Image (cartoon, helix red, strand yellow):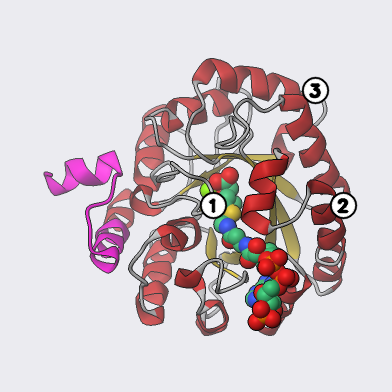
Amino acid sequence: SVPAEVSIYEVGPRDGLQNESAVVPTEGKLKLIGALADAGLKRIEVTSFVSPKWIPPLADSREVASSLEARPGVVWSALVPNAKGLEGAVAARMEEVAVFMSASETHNKKNINKTIEETFAAFAEVIGPARDAGMRVRGYVSVVWGCPYEGAVDPLRAREVADTLLQMGCYQVSLGDTIGVGTPGQTERIMGAMLEEIPAEKLALHFHDTRGTALANALVGLAYGITTLDASVGGLGGCPYAPGASGNLATEDLVYMLDGLGVRHGVDLEKLVAAGELAQELVGHELPGRYLKAHLGA
Ligand code: HMG
Ligand code: MG
């Protein structure tokens, strides 16, 4: 059986646009974020307060975040890797931020230039102060299904990292298949290991669809009682510091599957497709999402 209702956490404006070579103008980003909220998405990751040298396409994070108007029931979130990033999020009056790290030392180092231990120390300067400022803090653990540098990752090691983030004050940890290598049988094993220690409602799943397995993996997660799934409009996405990483699970594909299962999610598929078309125009190339392609007759 699957949950009666799930919450979709939209990462297109962040995970999607961070990986595009063409920089989308701030105004275009704001239009896309607005279209996603119009479609009924209630949790939207809008940008990253990271070094503009590391992620040039999101260099306008302060402008994007501070231009967003509050919408009833909608939470804007943004990635924050350190105290400097939190400063930006506080200045933009974010309600939620997300810290991010990896289950493997090498990907952690390549992505945020710190060891795992140094990362926990940096997050101690983010999570507590963010909560004191009234924000919710989400956590990410990347490369849980496999690392582009180290290969296989021990689920128990990934669980330890997730557990530490929860103990440090994250309300939820999203487990990432950063390079889209996961298969459903593996997802069953990872879920089994995670749920021995961590309740399902504290976890989210974040699949990249590099090998076409994201939707199947998401279905396994639902069968294990997971109620938050990350997805990206049109299947935009990828991590510039994970070679071979491509788009996320497309939000339209997820919504279409959930509709078929009778799982409530609150998103209007037609309006979501309109947001997908807008995203495609903004990035200037065809997006990988399958439902979107079928709809556009491509
Ligand atoms: P560093 O070079 O070690 O940082 O980078 P530093 O503290 O030595 O500072 C160097 C310079 O960066 C200084 O500027 C700082 O002020 C500046 P300078 O004096 O040279 O002019 N700086 C900043 N500027 C703006 N905002 C900040 C900030 N911090 C320092 N927050 C750092 C360390 C973490 C900053 C860097 O590695 C970084 O920004 N990394 C971000 C990488 C990233 O965003 N990756 C993609 C997101 S993760 C992902 O996609 C996976 C996910 O989707 C889940 C999944 O799929 O698994 C979440
Ligand atoms: Mg990602």
- Residue 273 left/right relative to 127: left
Q: Which amino acid is tagged 2?
A: Met
Q: Is residue 180 visible?
A: yes
Q: Give the answer, above or below, for where 287 lies relative to 98.
A: above
Magenta: main secondary structure equals: helix
Q: Which amino acid is tagged 3?
A: Glu
Residue 105 percent across, percent down from the top left: 72, 42
Residue 126 percent across, percent down from the top left: 80, 66
Do the numbered discs 1 and 3 sit on residues whose CB atoms are within 8 Å?
no
Residue on which the image places disc 3: 196
Q: In which quarter of the image is residue 178?
A: top right
**Sequence order check, earlier mark of 3 and 2:** 2
Q: Is mark 1 within 8 Å of ligand 1?
A: yes
- Residue 205 left/right relative to 159: left
Residue on which the image places disc 1: 241
Residue on which the image places disc 2: 168
Gap in angstroms between the C-alphas marked 1 and 2? 25 Å
Q: Give the answer, above or below, for where 285 lies relative to 30.
A: above
Q: Which amino acid is tagged 1?
A: Tyr
Badge 2 element: loop
**Sequence order check, earlier mark of 1 and 3:** 3
Determine the residue positioned at 33% across, 68% down: 22
Q: In which quarter of the image is residue 188?
A: top right
- Whether residue 9 is in magenta: the answer is no
- Whether residue 280 is in magenta: the answer is yes
Determine the residue positioned at 68% across, 48% down: 108
Residue 186 percent across, percent down from the top left: 58, 19
From which residue to which does the magenta span run? 274-298
Determine the residue positioned at 55% across, 19% down: 1
